[in-house]
Amino acid sequence: MITKSENRFIRINFITIIVTLIVILAGGIVRSTGSGMGCPDWPKCFDQYVPPTSASQLPANYEQKYIESRKKKNERFAKYLESFGKPQLADSLRNDKSILVHEEFNAAKTWTEYVNRLAGAILGIFLLLLAVFSWIYRRSATRITVLSWLNILIVGYQAWLGSIVVSTNLTQWVVTVHMLLALVILGIAIYTYNYAKELHKEPSVIMYRIAWLKGFLFFTMLISIVQIILGTEVREAIDVVAKALQYNARANWVSKVGTVFSYHRDLAVLVSACNFIVYKMVIDRFSGKAWPLITANYLMVVLGVQLVSGILLSYFGLPPYAQAIHITFSTMMFSLQYYLYLLVYRTKTYQSA
């Protein structure tokens, strides 16, 4: 029987997953509105805990101050890259003059980025609570405790990387790594949630072979991650095009992105097909109110929203709301795939007579 303390952990874990998705949504809004440099410093915003609402509230000579601060932080980051055997990345960072270009103050962008940071701070609090409450599993399910505390370390690294995103003026590959780390944090939270829920349950008995389903689900997750990475590269390429066009002629941005957009669009067909196959395999093997079937149904809904938002982005001039929806639902799709994989993975396999 699940104890009250274990139920508390499961509830907090579920809330943490939702908050993580909200943080990713907030990050998508920041990207789609071009608000990534709304706060030129970190963790404060214009050296204030509550950011300014007008240019008259800005610190004196803040531009030069933050540029000098960026130079120092970026040099430390370059040395960090060199220590990991990445001298070319370090040199490109040192020689990229666009990093030090100052962005004009915009109150809307500043507060958009600030809300994103607040969401990240709230996530940090929930992850800390989760780690503390995971102590009840230190003997019965040690991996839950270990992974919960590991997530604290990862989110700390993620926060530091967020400061690098700001100091490098949204350098593309740094933003991509920042996004992938968010998936790692989310994946660990989903794992501990499922493990804690299933700890006192007997695995389901299904009178079919499900090895193929497990393997195909894993493959589907892998190509979905590749698709997310390609999506971040498309976003980065669009940023370059947008700057070159001085943020005008938005309807023409997609056509100027190049082959990476074609790869992303074509892979979407494979991702969709794989998810439909997964759904068919699940409904053939589960029935009633089985959680794998319920999860697969949610997966189809999310896939539908994802496809619609992709069409809007491709053929309707990259509307910002569709960008935020697209990145959030791609993460939700991965989350449901992973949760479905965990549900199926713990299912006993029997060969039918």
Image: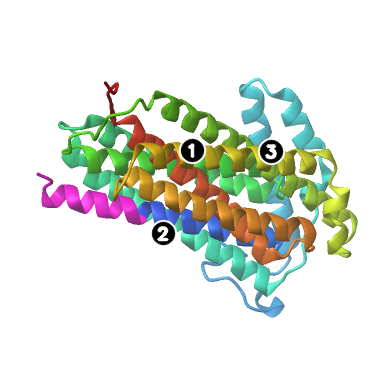
**What residue is shown with label 2?**
122
Residue 52 lies in magenta, yes or no?
Answer: no
Specify the quadrant that holds the N terminus: top left
Q: Which residues are magenta?
A: 1-15
Tag shown at residue 27:
none
Q: Nearer the viewer, residue 56 or 278?
A: 278
Q: Label 1 belongs to which residue?
A: 278
Find out whether the residues at labels 3 and 1 contact each other: C-beta distance under 8 Å. Answer: no
The quadrant of the rendering that contains the C terminus is: top left
Instruction: Determine which quarter of the picture holds residue 315.
Output: bottom right
> Mark 2 or 1, which is nearer the eye?
1
* Amino acid at dot 2: Ile
Which amino acid type is shown beneath numbered disc 3?
Answer: Leu
Q: Residue at (67%, 41%) from the top-left corner?
A: 269
| Residue located farthest toward the front when viewing the structure as drawn | 353
Measured as percent of width and height from the top left, residue 155 is found at 45, 44
Query: At numbered mark 1, what does the secondary structure look like: helix, strand or loop?
Result: helix
Residue 215 % position (x, y): 46, 25
**Circle 2 Cα neighbour tier, 10 Å, few/some/many (<14 / 14–19 / ≥20):** some
C-alpha distance separating marks 3 and 1:
16 Å
Q: Is residue 86 above or below residue 14?
A: above
Q: Which is nearer the eye, 276 or 170?
A: 276
Give yes or no for residue 13 being in the magenta stretch.
yes
Of callouts 2 and 3, the N-terminal one: 2
Numbered disc in front, either 3 or 1: 1
* 50 left or right of 17 in image: right
Q: Earlier in the sequence, mark 2 or mark 1?
A: 2
Q: Residue at the spot x=27%, y=31% of the render? A: 143
Q: Secondary structure at mark 2?
A: helix
Q: Which residue is mark 3?
A: 267
Residue sitting nearer the eye, 7 or 276: 276
